[in-house]
């Protein structure tokens, strides 16, 4: 490898893409194409970066399998940044195996970190933890140690283990200072910001207040009976009853939880559960059926008793009932929560992350686009969706997992 390629590689490792391009911008050999692609990715030109890396992969000869594997890893990172979650998973795994077989443990480890970050985005926490357990960060350079601590923090935040997350981010911050790469330092700072912005709202006794993530953790570990409107779960002293696939029952549970210890009129429950402004006798009959189903679902933790004007929630052990909701609630909140990270998503990636059909997600995107809440760019397979992030709120960590984790 010649001196210009070596110097460009060092510039990229130090987070200086312009310095790298100054050395190789006019070259079209395979190593230069690969480094130009990485430089363009660091500058945010992801489409051009992917084109250059694909050209580099083709330009490397059949005997240069390690170089080709490195290009595939770099392209996979661009796909992840583009939220193209359905692409190149098998190719990335094959590239990682090739790098491991040829002793390139640093790039092989980075490929695993990309796999873990993808698993975090689609909510597969157990699989992410198993993959992370295969890595030993002590043998890796500072940049990889930062990635290791960031994924530990990401898993911990989604598990609501905030002390563990803060400890991991503190280690990442020290490693970032050692590496001296501004982009990595900014990534750590963004992760720390998540822990210090509201993640949910607490609704109790007719009042509401915002909760940080560690306060959410403390609430779920408390003795309170919690109607969790973030994940559509009812929680009581370690027991969790999921109503994520039973939206009518959850709507009734939430209405009863918000009113506790008071009862809720029948017509109000009909409106909350069925979306009807006026209730007739058939609707009240349907309400009685759904209340019976709710009683059966909650029988181990609470009772739903009839009153003269409606129904009331009566927890069996807890002395307090609270509702925990997202900081901002509106229709298609799950789609908006994912788009709020500021990245551009494809509809297929959104469907994968939400566990919904692509048609359902596309209808939600079209509805949001009509009201100006999301924007699209590109066409056909390159079509991407994005929205400006809502400042001051963390919205994705408490999304209900629609898959078996």
Image: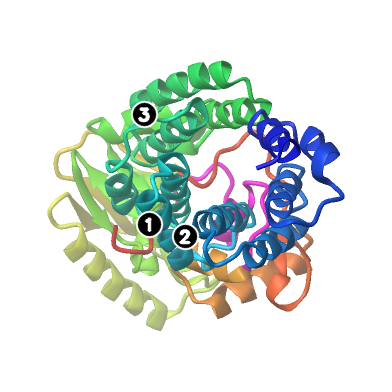
Q: CA distance from mark 1 to mark 3?
A: 18 Å
Residue placed under numbered mark 2 in the picture = 92
User: In which image quadrant can residue 180 be found?
Assistant: top right
The residue that label 3 is drawn on is: 139
Question: Which quarter of the rendering shows the N terminus?
Answer: top right
Dot 3: element: helix
The correct choice, above or below, for 67 with respect to 212 in the image is: below
Q: Earlier in the sequence, mark 3 or mark 2?
A: 2
Please state the extent of the stretch shown in magenta in the rendering. 326-346
Q: What SS does tag 2 mark?
A: helix
Q: Nearer the viewer, mark 1 or mark 2?
A: 1
Magenta span includes 226: no
Helix, strand or loop at disc 1?
A: helix
Percent across and percent down for residue 155 are 38, 40
Which residue sits at x=14%, y=57%?
A: 299
Q: How is the image coloured?
A: rainbow
Residue 156 pos. (x, y %): 36, 35
Tell how many labels.
3
């Amino acid at each position: 490898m010649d001196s210009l390629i070596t110097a460009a590689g060092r510039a990229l490792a130090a987070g200086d893409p312009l310095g790298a391009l100054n050395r190789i911008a006019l070259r079209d050999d395979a190593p230069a194409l690969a480094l130009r692609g990485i430089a363009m990715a660091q500058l945010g030109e992801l489409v051009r970066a992917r084109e250059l890396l694909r050209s580099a992969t083709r330009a490397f000869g059949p005997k240069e399998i390690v170089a080709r594997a490195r290009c595939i890893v770099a392209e996979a990172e661009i796909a992840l940044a583009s939220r193209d979650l359905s692409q190149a998973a098998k190719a990335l795994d094959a590239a990682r195996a090739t790098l491991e077989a040829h002793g390139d443990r640093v790039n092989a480890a980075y490929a695993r970190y990309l796999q873990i970050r993808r698993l975090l985005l689609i909510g597969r926490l157990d699989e992410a933890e198993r993959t992370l357990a295969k890595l030993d960060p002590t043998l890796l350079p500072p940049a990889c140690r930062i990635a290791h601590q960031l994924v530990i923090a990401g898993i911990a935040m989604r598990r609501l283990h905030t002390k563990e997350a803060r400890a991991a981010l503190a280690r990442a911050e020290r490693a970032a200072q050692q590496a001296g790469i501004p982009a990595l330092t900014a990534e750590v700072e963004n992760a720390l910001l998540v822990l210090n912005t509201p993640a949910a709202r607490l609704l109790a006794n007719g009042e509401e207040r915002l909760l940080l993530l560690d306060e959410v953790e403390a609430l779920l570990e408390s003795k309170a009976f919690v109607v969790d409107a973030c994940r559509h779960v009812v929680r009581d002293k370690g027991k969790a009853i999921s109503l994520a696939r039973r939206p009518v029952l959850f709507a009734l549970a939430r209405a009863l939880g918000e009113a506790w210890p008071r009862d809720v009129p029948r017509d109000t429950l009909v409106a909350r559960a069925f979306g009807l402004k006026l209730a007739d006798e058939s609707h009240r009959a349907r309400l009685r059926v759904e209340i019976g189903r709710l009683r059966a679902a909650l029988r181990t933790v609470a009772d739903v008793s009839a009153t003269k004007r409606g129904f009331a929630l009566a927890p069996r052990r807890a002395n307090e009932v609270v509702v925990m909701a997202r900081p901002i609630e509106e229709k298609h909140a799950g789609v908006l929560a994912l788009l709020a990270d500021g990245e551009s998503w494809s509809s297929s990636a959104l469907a994968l992350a939400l566990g919904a059909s692509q048609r359902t997600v596309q209808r939600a995107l079209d509805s949001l686009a009509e009201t100006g809440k999301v924007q699209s760019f590109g066409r056909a397979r390159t079509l991407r969706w994005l929205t400006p992030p809502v400042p001051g709120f963390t919205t994705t960590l408490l999304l209900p997992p629609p898959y078996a984790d």
